[in-house]
């Protein structure tokens, strides 16, 4: 992985500076993939859209914050570092943050899709660490049911993700019906893994180990 420029933005909530680190190039060596669609790649870190400002704790859409500067990764840094010395990196929101944003109402469907997907992933993060017997909370279940309504099952990626959501909700017959529809060869392994978990009536998220 090689770093890209650090973009300096001004938080619209408090006016303080945020350092947005970017990626010049990356790869998926050593990455882990999960049935809910999450990817954990040390050489290609996540670039979240909704973030928490370290200064004020506000939740903000990073691309909507005013860009006030940029620091190149390999260039001279002294002047820029001094100018933006109080800039802090953003923090990643928690599941409670995502659900709180949704509770306020989101009219933008793209943002709603993002929030519901990230809430699903955040809720599953504890289960990825071995706590896979922890049942979903009522809030997680409601979020996942609402997320399914946003997925287009006529498109194969949307269909697969909807099947996985149904499996995790224990809707095994519905998941089987979606998985029985055609998928491209590129998706054959995740389809097979999710299909096997569905047949075993397992509801927890699982790692996909590609062969």
Image (cartoon, rainbow, N blue to C red):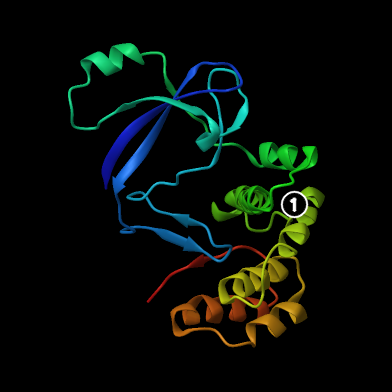
Q: Residues within 10 Å of mark 1 (few under 14, many from 20)?
A: many
Instruction: Choose top left, top right, bottom left or bottom right for residue 132.
Output: bottom right
Q: Secondary structure at mark 1?
A: helix
Relative to 174, residue 149 above or below: above
Relative to 71, residue 34 above or below: below
Q: Considering the image in quadrants, where does the C terminus appear?
A: bottom left
**Residue visible at 69% across and 53% down?**
109
Closer to us: 209 or 144: 144
**Residue visible at 30% across and 52% down?**
26
Relative to 102, residue 200 above or below: below
Closer to us: 173 or 68: 68
Could you tell me residue 13's position as x and y percent? 61, 21
Closer to us: 76 or 89: 76
**Residue visible at 27% across and 48% down?**
1
Instruction: Choose top left, top right, bottom left or bottom right for residue 149.
Output: bottom right
Could you tell me residue 157's position as x and y percent? 56, 72
Counting every numbered tag in the picture gives 1
Relative to 208, residue 44 above or below: above
Residue 110 left/right relative to 211: right
Residue at image mark 1: 140
Could you tell me residue 107's position as x and y percent? 74, 46
Instruction: Choose top left, top right, bottom left or bottom right for residue 103.
Output: top right
**Residue visible at 78% across and 37% down?**
104
Residue 153 left/right relative to 48: right
Could you tell me residue 164's position as x and y percent? 64, 69
């Amino acid at each position: 992985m090689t770093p890209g420029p650090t973009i300096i933005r001004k938080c619209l909530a408090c006016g303080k500076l945020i350092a947005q680190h970017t990626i010049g190039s990356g790869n998926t060596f050593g990455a882990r993939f999960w049935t809910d669609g999450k990817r954990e790649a040390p050489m290609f870190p996540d670039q979240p859209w909704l973030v928490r400002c370290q200064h004020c704790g506000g939740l903000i859409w990073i691309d909507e914050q005013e860009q006030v500067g940029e620091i190149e990764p390999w260039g001279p840094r002294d002047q820029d570092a001094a100018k933006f010395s109080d800039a802090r990196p953003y923090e990643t929101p928690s599941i409670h943050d995502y659900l709180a944003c949704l509770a306020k109402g989101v009219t933008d469907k793209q943002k709603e899709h993002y929030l519901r997907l990230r809430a699903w992933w955040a809720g599953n993060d504890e289960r990825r660490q071995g706590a896979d017997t922890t049942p979903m909370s009522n809030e997680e279940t409601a979020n996942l049911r609402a997320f399914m309504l946003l997925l287009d099952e006529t498109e194969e990626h949307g269909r697969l993700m909807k099947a996985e959501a149904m499996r995790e909700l224990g809707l095994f017959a519905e998941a089987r019906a979606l998985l029985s529809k055609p998928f491209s060869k590129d998706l054959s392994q995740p389809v097979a893994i999710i299909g096997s978990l569905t047949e075993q009536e397992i509801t927890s998220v699982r790692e996909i180990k590609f062969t």
